[in-house]
Image: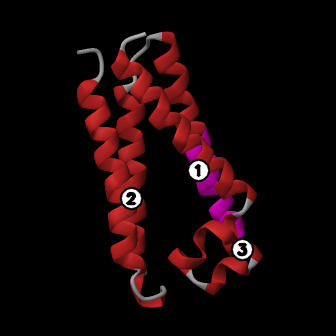
Amino acid sequence: MPASRILAAAVLGLRIAYGAALVAAPERLTRRWLGPAVADAPAQVALRGLGAREVLLHAGGLAAALRGDAVRPWLAASVAGDVSDIAATVGGRRGLPDGSAPATLVVAGASAVISVAVGALLDR
């Protein structure tokens, strides 16, 4: 397997782990991002849905990487998810803890940049 696919598989695997952790412990992973409302059951439903999105999307990308199929579409979908997380956080920033929007920009933005970089390196 080319090194670029190994790198893609590693990045996708980390995103699967993050999604699984979000499903298992949404309050613990998101309190600094969203504040005390994450303790409420309705917020946890949405956060577990976000975690499931991460798991399923990145598992599809990982399977494609391991099979030798196209991975860039999966990475593009991952970037779209990161950008939507940033947009949603910025849009709701007035009700979020101080520093949440800039921190989300850094974390989700870095994740998107990593996905773009991995996509650019694939199969070179």
Query: Mark 1 highlights which residue?
Result: 18
Farthest residue to the front: give it. 3
- Indicate yes or no whether the magenta region holds residue 89: no
Q: Look at the picture and state if 56 lies above or below 106.
A: above
**Which residue does the image show at 43% across and 79% down from the upper left?**
100
On screen, residue 109 versus residue 12, left or right, reads left
Query: Mark 2 highlights which residue?
Result: 108
The type of residue carrying mark 1 is Tyr
* Helix, strand or loop at mark 2: helix
Residue 42: mark: 3
**Which residue does the image show at 42% across and 32% down from the upper left?**
74
Q: For residue 27, say whether it is visible.
A: yes
Q: Look at the picture and state if 61 lies above or below 14.
A: above
Identify the mark nearer the N-term, 2 or 3: 3
| First to last magenta residue range | 44-55
- Callout 3: 10 Å neighbours few (<14), some, many (20+)? few
Instruction: Find the distance from the CA under tag 2 to the CA under tag 3.
Output: 23 Å
Instruction: Find the distance from the CA under tag 1 to the CA under tag 3.
Output: 20 Å
Task: Give residue 68's position: percent from left, percent from top.
Answer: 44, 11
Q: Nearer the viewer, mark 2 or mark 3?
A: 2
- Quadrant position of the N terminus in the picture: top left
Q: Main secondary structure of the magenta part?
A: helix
On screen, residue 46 versus residue 75, left or right, reads right
In the foreground, 26 or 49: 26
- Callout 2: 10 Å neighbours few (<14), some, many (20+)? some
**Which residue does the image show at 70% across and 55% down from the upper left?**
23
- Callout 1: 10 Å neighbours few (<14), some, many (20+)? some
The type of residue carrying mark 3 is Pro
Task: Give residue 26's position: percent from left, percent from top.
Answer: 68, 65
- Quadrant position of the C terminus in the picture: top left
